[in-house]
Amino acid sequence: MAARLATTELRRVSHPGRVTWEPTDQAEPVPVPPTVVDGDGDLWLRDRGTGTWTMPEFNPKEFPARCGEVLTWNQLAREFGPLTALADDRRIGGGRR
């Protein structure tokens, strides 16, 4: 967990205009970003209809099987965080940095 929290801080310093959530940020942000990158820099997309997240580039030869599943925000943040919004807009997610 220490490495993931260090990655969170590095992202916040490297991308000050983008919102980054820690792995422990379990409350889904409001408004919810449509896309995020995880701790490894992999893209995740949110389904507006269901509110769930999927990895569009999932390849079972390259990623753990869990990356191919449909996840909730809580699961995504806990297992693959930190999560960073792609948009340079601090208003996403209620202004968290």
Image (tube, grey):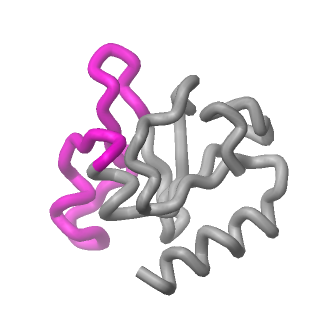
**Residue found 27% across the figure and 51% down from its top:** 75
Measured as percent of width and height from the top left, residue 88 is found at 79, 41
Q: In this view, does 61 lie to the left or right of 74?
A: left
**Residue found 31% across the figure and 47% down from its top:** 74
> Across the whole image, how many numbered discs are drawn on residues?
0
**Residue found 42% across the figure and 40% down from its top:** 27
Q: Main secondary structure of the magenta part?
A: loop
Of residues 10 and 57, the one drawn nearer to the viewer in this rendering? 10
Measured as percent of width and height from the top left, residue 30 is found at 54, 26
Of residues 94 and 58, the one drawn nearer to the viewer in this rendering? 94
Q: Which residue occupies the extreme top position in the image?
A: 49
- Specify whether residue 52 is painted magenta: yes
- Span highlighted in magenta in the image: 46-74
Residue 72, compared with residue 13, is above or below; it is above
Where residue 81 sits, quadrant-wise, is bottom left
- Specify whether residue 62 is painted magenta: yes
Where residue 56 sits, quadrant-wise, is top left
Q: In this view, does 40 lie to the left or right of 58?
A: right
**Residue found 60% across the figure and 80% down from its top:** 6
Residue 66, compared with residue 30, is above or below; it is below
Measured as percent of width and height from the top left, residue 18 is found at 74, 48
Q: Which residue occupies the extreme bottom position in the image?
A: 3
Q: Is residue 59 left or right of residue 77?
A: left
Of residues 41 and 24, the one drawn nearer to the viewer in this rendering? 24
Residue 94, compared with residue 50, is above or below; it is below
Q: In which quarter of the image is the N terminus?
A: bottom left
Of residues 61 and 51, the one drawn nearer to the viewer in this rendering? 51
